[in-house]
Amino acid sequence: MPEGDTVARLARRMDAVLAGRRLLAGRLMVPAHAGADLAGALVLGTATHGKHLLTRLDHDGEALTLHTHLRMDGEWALLGPGKRLPAARHPDVRALLVTSEQRSAAGLRLPVVELLRTSREADAVGHLGPDLLHDGFDAALAARNLLADPARPLAGALLDQRNLAGLGNLWANELCFLLGRSPWTPVGDLGEDGVARAVALAEKALRASAAGTTGYQVTTGDTRPGQEHWVAGNAGKPCRRCGTTVRVVDGAAGASSGADQRYGVHRRTWWCPRCQPGPQP
């Protein structure tokens, strides 16, 4: 599932195609909105909250938001003037936005396509914690959310979008390594200072990745292929720091499995037993 930095980068690409332009055509190929016609709407831009995309429109003076989520299989195909999707992809289209300049954005295999009034965006994303990439990110609130369940394993707490929005499995695993903590460490064991440090590190890392200042999703500082991560994807290899074999187990430490099962998400937990002392699975 794409993480918050991936979705933020996608939103910028969508803005380059759509923002400030009027739609020549706008159709949603989902049962709930099959009759919606967005032709003539002005695209104001695409914002994000965590892993959610919010494409805002002015449609005849009415403020509307197209809320989409990629989950595991969704994507937005962005096409320049006159470009068209291959015919084989047409059955996958769930949303199609075409500007008057013949630029287009096609939402493919999107599991979430929802059209709502912009004033009701909280119905879609109001349950989420503060977004690590938003201006004015409330780090104190994120820390309080994490500490509200002190017995919960750290990796699962970081993954819970209700605590803070934007981290996925890669970032949760890499942050646990950078913090020197087992993914199964109870959040409460970090104490207030430790949790504040975890939130600050998460914000810094995700912002740098979204902006591309340290390379996209690079945690080691080494952008060479195969060298970007400390533990994620490195099962059976020697730890880059101490040489101990990196281990992996199926499932995300302390994460709620209900949503994962519902949306077909398969997670793994990677860690170095020496660099990350503490509880083991």
Image (cartoon, rainbow, N blue to C red):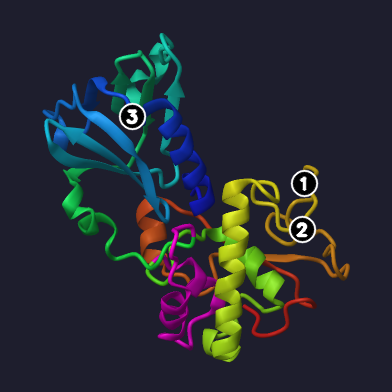
Q: In which quarter of the image is residue 224?
A: top right
Q: In which quarter of the image is residue 134?
A: bottom left
- Residue placed furthest toward the right: 243
Measured from the top left, where is residue 22 in percent x and y?
Answer: 26, 23
Above or below, 241 against 121 in this view is below
Point out the frontmost of discs 3 and 1.
3
Q: Residue at x 64, y 68 (%)?
A: 175
Q: In this view, does 38 lie to the left or right of 214?
A: left
Mark 3 residue element: loop
> Who comes first in sequence, dot 3 or dot 2?
3
Labelled disc at residue 223: 1
Q: Is residue 252 left or right of residue 136?
A: right
**Residue type of the residue flagged with mark 1:** Thr
**Residue type of the residue flagged with mark 2:** Thr
Q: Is residue 44 left or right of residue 265?
A: left
Q: Residue at x 66, y 64 (%)?
A: 174
Q: Label 3, on which residue?
A: 20
Mark 1 Cα-neighbour bin, 10 Å: few <14, some 14–19, many ≥20 = some
Q: Label 2, on which residue?
A: 220
Above or below, 136 against 67 in this view is below
Mark 2 residue element: loop
Measured from the top left, where is residue 67 in percent x and y?
Answer: 28, 44
Q: Nearer the viewer, residue 200 or 123?
A: 200
Q: Residue at x 30, y 25 (%)?
A: 96
Measured from the top left, where is residue 248 in percent x and y?
Answer: 67, 64
Instruction: Report the span colored magenta.
Output: 133-161
Q: Does the magenta stretch include residue 231?
A: no
Q: Is residue 152 magenta?
A: yes
